[in-house]
Amino acid sequence: MTRALAECGSSSVFRSGVAPLESVGIRTSFKTIERVSERVGAEVAETQHGPIARSTAQSQAPRNRAELLVLQGDGMRIRERTAGDGGKSDTSADPSAEADDGIPRQDYDNGWRECKVGVVSRMRRGRVDRNGEYRDPEVLVQTSLATMCDIKVFSEKLLAEAERRGLRKAKEVVAVSDAGHGLPEVWRDQFGGSIDAWIVDFHHVSARIHECATVVSRDQRAASKLFGRWKDLLYDGHVEKLLRQLTSHAQEHASRPKKLTRLREGSPGRVLWTHVFYIEKYHEHMDYAYYRSRGWPIGSGHVEALAKQIGVRMKGASKRWTPVVGSEAMANLIADRASQDGRWEKRWPCQVYSAANVQLG
């Protein structure tokens, strides 16, 4: 019964879960669904990712050595309830300032918090097929985690999850993400020599050069062709050549600025230099031709899919979550159910009763 309520609560709005449960003979209230979902989510957070669970993670690693272990990270905003004036921002605070997790101060004061999401996958290496097309690595088993905690706690939880999947004995370990949400520091400081490479998500960089192409050429067809050429350069490992071309176009609009804030926001020069600086800073993590030759992934679609799944349930115009007991519990619950190692099923004993005419709440 508890499982049915938790699954219902993590899949849809609490009120929307009442009717489906009644259709199978379970009479309950939305408040009961909410309470049970939050309780189970809190149990998941503690038993799967709490301090004790993290300390024993390595002992749970499979005996067989992973051919390729892939770590992915991402972040998204969830809105929590705030005390005091109903969630209105503190007008005395500097709206341009940022809170600890990088969210603008005004948004932070309005209840916005970052939910950090991680995925660990044991994979079979990618390959080039008969037609010369690269086939992405195949996922063998994938586990997930999500937390509203700060980046330090997130990195500890992600490390434990990686150890649980065989980090220390894996033949190769790579991390894939964009360069936001504090993730570069996670890969460098928490994992250090444990990973063979950090790969900046190819599709994220592609989106940046697409914006550059639309700035350089206002004609849609010409911009599309230009983007295609630049994307090919990126994909084939010619990042230096791509950078030279982007820099040349940026200089046509504005001289290289010491600070981007000296350029008008939204101006062509600022857009182009923003992306040039990004690629210059992280170009060592964009050797996509080499990554494919090793059979590694170049995109972080799996963690983005998990973030989207959490967002569908937890984001919305009228949705605000109680800190910790609501937001943290629900994020953990959704991520646990998304894991493919059977952990959710193992949490529950076999059903030995009929659900008909059961009434709760």
Image (cartoon, helix red, strand yellow):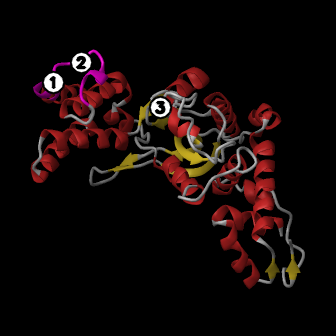
Crowd class of label 2 (few under 14; some 14 to 19; many from 20; radius 10 Å): few
**Does the rendering let one see residue 344?**
yes
- What numbered label is drawn on residue 254? 1
Q: Which residue is mark 2?
A: 257
What SS does tag 2 mark? loop
Residue 310 picture location, percent across and down: 58, 54
For residue 187, what is the image quadrant? top right
**Does the rendering let one see residue 67?**
no
Q: Is residue 56 magenta?
A: no
Amino acid type of disc 2?
Pro
In the rendered image of this protein, does residue 166 appear above or below residue 282?
A: below
Residue at point 29%, 39% (across, down): 208
Residue range (magenta): 250-264
Quarter of the image for the N terminus: give it. bottom right
Residue at point 66%, 51% (across, down): 321
Q: Which residue is mark 3?
A: 95
Q: CA distance from mark 3 to mark 1?
A: 28 Å
For this rendering, which residue is in front, 30 or 294?
Answer: 30
For this rendering, which residue is in front, 102 or 163?
Answer: 102
Crowd class of label 3 (few under 14; some 14 to 19; many from 20; radius 10 Å): some
